[in-house]
Image (cartoon, rainbow, N blue to C red):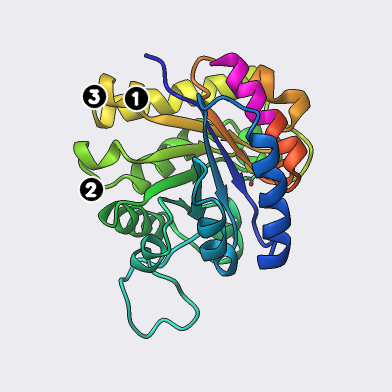
Amino acid sequence: MTRQFLIAGNWKMNCGPADAAELLENLKKQKQELADVVDVLVCPPFVSLSMSVNYLHETDIQVGAQNLHFEDEGAYTGEVSARMIAESGCNYVIVGHSERRQYFGETDEIVNRKARKALEHRLAPVICVGESLDQRKNEKHHSVVEEQVKAALNEVGHSEVLDAVIAYEPIWAIGTGETATPGQAQEMHAHIRTILAEMYTDEIAASLRILYGGSMKPHNAEELLSQDDVDGGLIGGASLKAESFTEIITIAENLS
Ligand code: 13P
């Protein structure tokens, strides 16, 4: 089964509308050179979503949000719903990033509610899972990730899950410059695929994309993306420069 790579940029709390315009302008210029065999996604902060959608209108670069609330509307000051994100023209949303779990108290249950709400509104949730350094040192990484995957997809049916994307992001590799080795990434991705096969079917597990995230850069992207079960990247720092993001897209294209 060949899965098309998805190269996704998580801009985190960077790039308001002015910086976003500059980054997207550069990205558009560089991306024009490329063939279209890789799916490309950018996830700007909320305030830059609409302009990014408009800006990328005639390209095939997709736009996603970084978070959502699990209710459709109401008295939730400061929150943004799946319906609003979809209305803004996005088709993806990141769910359960470790920074949200760590700094904003997102539990597995909240992640599940968000993932289900995204799917209800035809937004593809990019569901993030991953262990801490302590958990890996204590050999708990397999069970931690298994729990996170199972909890995030609780009550998500066979037909709905096909729209979901899983991102394995070991916390110790995020923003640290330290990357999982290709072997560590492959091993965990295969583990996740086995869990998905148990929850759903072999076919569904084989068709779902599992991205790697955590200090993916142009210099290590090729060996990570060459792994059988690595179907793309969720890229933080290196997605903030059009050059490095495009370099990673090109690497994925050459591997396609
Ligand atoms: P870095 O690529 O900066 O390590 O960030 C990874 C990440 O958290 C993407 O969601």
As drawn, the label of residue 253 is none
Residue at the spot 61% in from the left edge and 45% down from the top edge: 9
Instruction: Determine the image quadrant of residue 222.
Output: top right
Tell me where the magenta segment starts and ends, as one range. Answer: 248-256
Q: Look at the picture and state if 229 lies above or below 176.
A: above
As drawn, the label of residue 207 is 1
Magenta stretch contains residue 148: no
Q: Disc 2 or disc 1, which is closer to the eye?
A: 1
| Mark toward the start of the polypeptide (3 vs 1) | 3
Instruction: Name the residue type under label 3.
Output: Thr
Q: Position of residue 239 (x, y in %)?
A: 69, 44
Q: Look at the picture and state if 30 lies above or below 120.
A: above
> Where in the image, quadrant-wise, is ligand 1 located?
top right
| Mark toward the start of the polypeptide (3 vs 2) | 2
As drawn, the label of residue 201 is 3
Q: Nearer the viewer, residue 6 or 125?
A: 6
How many angstroms separate mark 2 from mark 1 (CA)?
A: 19 Å
Q: Look at the picture and state if 106 lies above or below 198.
A: below
Magenta stretch contains residue 249: yes
Q: Nearer the viewer, residue 110 or 135?
A: 110
Residue 238 vs residue 76: left or right? right
